[in-house]
Amino acid sequence: MASIKTLLITGVSSGFGRALAQEALAAGHRVVGTVRSEASKREFEALAPDRALGRVLDVTDFGSIDGVVAEVEASVGPVDVLVNNAGYGHEGVMEESPLAEMRRQFDVNVFGAVAMIKAVLPYMRERRRGHILNITSMGGYITMPGIAYYCGSKFALEGISEALGKEVEPFGIAVTAVAPGSFRTDWAGRSMVRTPRSISDYDALFDPVRTAREEKSGKQAGDPVKAARAMLAVISATRPPAHLLLGSDALGLVRAKLSVLSDEIAAWEAVTLSTDV
Ligand code: NAP
């Protein structure tokens, strides 16, 4: 069996975080999982007494993150793998969606993840080893109308992940941005924040998008348990990838986007090349 590791996973109450925690526990690893209530903590810890260790933490409680990580390092032991999984989707036409919704989206999906990374890095750097997985999304490559803030947050996390990977690679620390397609979690159900409609000009474009996403919730093609197994394979790889897509929809849509992007770059190449001094 591969070596036993300690994983620190944010958001283990449901979805990918829960599936990864369960698969990691089944593989013999130790999992420190963050949740947002004492009841969720008890429920998580019941999965595997002594090896499933819950910590109550909202990732936007920035003042608490360093202390929680320090306490985990001291009382549980070295964190080998940080998985920034906690996140949610905001859905709403951009013009209709208050800036406060964008701030909240970025606070959780971007600033929360970065704050967690900044808390674990001093320990990983000192040990000259570690692995950080950031759960981004195919929405970190492709976009759809109605999820501008979400895509913005996931593009941001993709960019931060990639740059960070180049900074910490000399210290033996790997960074992998994991970009799932549509999976059967609570993402499009209880967790999604939906801005109410207010501008009828967008009805024709957006109403079908909202309805389709609501109808698809719980019927997505992606299996979170299989995603968890894929992530465990990445965690045990000697040379983990900087980017990993999960799901046939992610593969098809991202490849199509790259092809359109490549064609557009070629179509405008002369203009692009016209600007050097
Ligand atoms: P999920 O079942 O709704 O799980 C989300 C988890 O994040 C829950 O444990 C939730 O905790 C936690 N969370 C949310 N906000 C938090 C906060 N401020 N502080 C701490 N924890 C917080 O959905 P999921 O699909 O597994 O989502 C996990 C990640 O995958 C997210 O980053 C999401 O954007 C990404 N993703 C999902 C899909 C998909 O199709 N499902 C596709 C691409 C990417 P509570 O139970 O307390 O709310």
Image: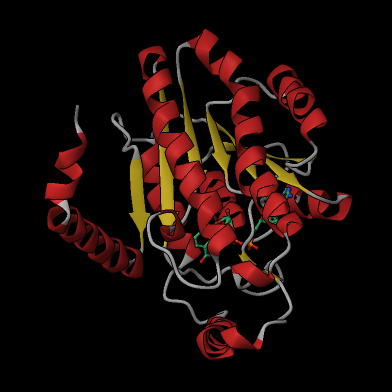
Name the outermost residue toward the right.
38
Q: Is residue 205 above or below residue 220?
A: below
The residue at 19%/53% (across/down) is 265
Quarter placement of the C terminus: top left
Q: Is residue 186 visible?
A: no
Which one is in front, 152 or 65?
152
Name the outermost residue toward the front.
277
Q: Is residue 213 above or below residue 231?
A: below
Which one is in front, 273 or 80?
273
Estimate the x, y position of residue 5 in percent, counting from the top left.
Answer: 52, 30
The residue at 48%/35% (across/down) is 160
In the image: residue 45, left or right of residue 91:
right
Quarter placement of the N terminus: top left
Estimate the x, y position of residue 81 in percent, counting from the top left.
Answer: 52, 31
In the image: residue 17, left or right of residue 62:
left
Which one is in front, 134 or 34?
134
Task: Please identify the quarter of the rendering in which residue 60 is found.
Answer: top right
Which one is in front, 53 or 215?
215
Q: Can residue 34 be seen in this view?
A: yes
Estimate the x, y position of residue 87 in percent, counting from the top left.
Answer: 63, 53
The residue at 50%/44% (across/down) is 156
The residue at 57%/20% (across/down) is 121
Q: Is residue 200 above or below residue 243?
A: below
Task: Please identify the quarter of the rendering in which residue 139 is found.
Answer: bottom left
Report how many numbered discs are placed on residues in the image: 0
Estimate the x, y position of residue 65 in percent, counting from the top left.
Answer: 75, 30
In the image: residue 55, left or right of residue 214:
right
